[in-house]
Image: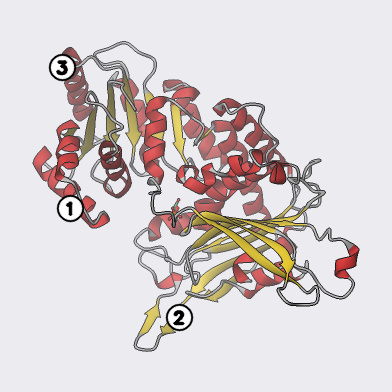
Amino acid sequence: NIDSNFQFILFGGTGDLAHNKIIPAFYNLVARDILTNKYTIIATGRRYKNKNEYLAALYKSLKNKKKKIDSKHWKKLASHLEYFQLSFKNEADFKKLENHLVQKDKTEKISERIFYLATAPKFFAEIAKKLDKFNLLNAGFKTNNSKLVIEKPFGHDFKSAQKLNNTLSKIFSEKNIFRIDHYLGKEMIQNIMVIRLSNPIFRALWNKEHIDNIQIYLNESEGVKDRGKYYDDTGVIKDMFQNHILQILSLITMEEPENLSAAEISQKKVEVFKELADNDLSNIDEHIVRGQYSSNIIENKNSKKSIKAYREEKEIDPNSKTATFMALKLFLNNQRWQDVPIYLKSGKRLNKKEAAIAIEFKDDFHAAYTEDQKLSSNILLIKIQPEEGVSLRFNTRKPASNNKIVPVEMEFCQSCQQFFNSPENYEGLIYDMIAGDKTLFTSWEEVSYSWKFIDKIQKKCQEQKIKLHSYPAQTGGPKAADKLLEADNRIWQDKK
Ligand code: BG6
């Protein structure tokens, strides 16, 4: 349980993120009795005039999200919530906030402040500078321990990320900057290290001698929704690869950490990011497939639904060349993984939402069994969502046959367990930021090398004029992405 007397100051308190993720996560923490009675959440925003208006709006969002709201928990949370009307363009508002914090601290001895910027990223630097200028980190009490929490994207390339980091690190120390990658809050992502390191059967085989290839796919069925403006400048490469996919890749391929401290794990991940950044990408044209969704009509028995093309979506340039899909094959040039292909893929408007990591083991069968039949490889599938779980494919004798061998799957469905209710991504992240545990947050080094890698891919794609394939919305993505694996005699595990 969290027993600290923290102040959680939420910028962008009236925005989507606060309504749909942050406040619901606090509600769950209250419902699970994890927070004690001492904290305050000060949500700032322009939209509402007073706390009652704000609470009414929050309640409505929570109601949309949850089937049932327990009024006891809601009242408890509401009693810890304050609303402070503030425009981050207006310096006088920051001055008022400073006075407010000083006054509050006279009555409530607070232990720390957490500034959460749930705003558009272009305001991060500006808000951080104002926090400093108006002494909000220290107002009312002396500390150099105030924390800053920011969402992705952290910059839009290496240079802008570095500039932002320089600004932030003059105000907050690295240990107090919490960069969120909400994928790290997902149950099965937190399970990767456990599966890898606490099971000798996997740990012993986690290398190029035994693993044939690694696949990571984060398939989405939704389009860009109302985020066209942001997405058209970003595309799948910066929206999903630079952060979520590369983070997963680093956890799967990093060397074993000596201990489980956040610093040690981050160091091991950084080694992977460095190697990626050193990747020469010389034949990227053979290893990358970029795509953009086109319109489609989906006919069911009783209905016919037309789906817009990306270029017809709200706030998207009608000639946009932004990729909404990307598949990439790459190698890590190190002892553990040399020559093991790693296939990555993510896209919007694919036929179903499905995210998983597939580890395919080498065909190292006893020759006696492969004389007259082709055996299936062993596959470990870590299912991230919508189902959370693990499956393992292995070979068995077909019953009542003459030694015919068939593959079967052993399944562990975590999200199907009745006693188990997966916490939401943000619950754990909020808990950890209050507790000061940085394991599930990305360090500046990780971010900086991942940007170097992404910048390099972007540059190569431009230089080599990599084609943008079109794929009909709500299908399996460009055919070229399947061919990428077929050329290696492999298939995507989501297509089997
Ligand atoms: C976000 C991206 O980081 O992740 C979105 O900006 C994407 O475009 C989302 O839809 C996917 O997250 P999840 O948790 O729904 O898989």
Which of the 4 image quadrants contains residue 286? bottom right
Marks counted in the figure total: 3
Q: Is residue 326 left or right of residue 395?
A: left
The residue tagged with tag 1: helix, strand or loop? Answer: helix
- Mark 2 or 1: the one toward you: 1
Q: Residue type at mark 3: give it.
A: Gln
| Secondary structure of the residue carrying numbered label 2 | strand
Quadrant (top left, top right, bottom left, bottom right) of the N terminus: top left
Nearer the observer: mark 1 or 3; the answer is: 1
Other-residue count near label 1 (Cα within 10 Å), few / some / many at <14 / 14–19 / ≥20 = few
User: What separation in Å lies between label 2 and label 3 (alpha carbons)?
Assistant: 58 Å
Give the residue displayed 32% in from the left and 46% down from the top: 21
Q: Could you tell me which residue is drawn at 66 percent across and 31 percent down?
A: 257
Instruction: Assess disc 2: are there few (<14), some (14-19) or many (≥20) residues with their C-alpha within 10 Å of its C-alpha.
Output: some
- In the rendered structure, which amino acid carries the disc numbered 1? Lys
Compared to 7, does 440 lie above or below?
below
Q: Are marks 2 and 3 in contact (CB under 8 Å)?
A: no
Chain-order first, disc 1 or disc 3:
1
List x then y, in percent, for residue 67: 23, 57
Q: Quadrant of the C terminus?
A: bottom right
Disc 2 residue: CB within 8 Å of ligand 1? no
Q: Secondary structure at mark 3?
A: helix
| Image quadrant in which you'd find residue 13 | top left
Using the image, tell me which numbered label, if any, was put on residue 371.
none
Q: Residue at x 51, y 62 (%)?
A: 354
Could you tell me which residue is drawn at 51 percent across and 32 percent down? 439
Amino acid at circle 2: Asn
Frontmost residue, 314 versus 414: 414
Residue position for label 3:
103
Q: Is residue 192 above or below residue 391?
A: above
Residue that numbered label 1 is attached to = 60
The furthest residue to the top: 142
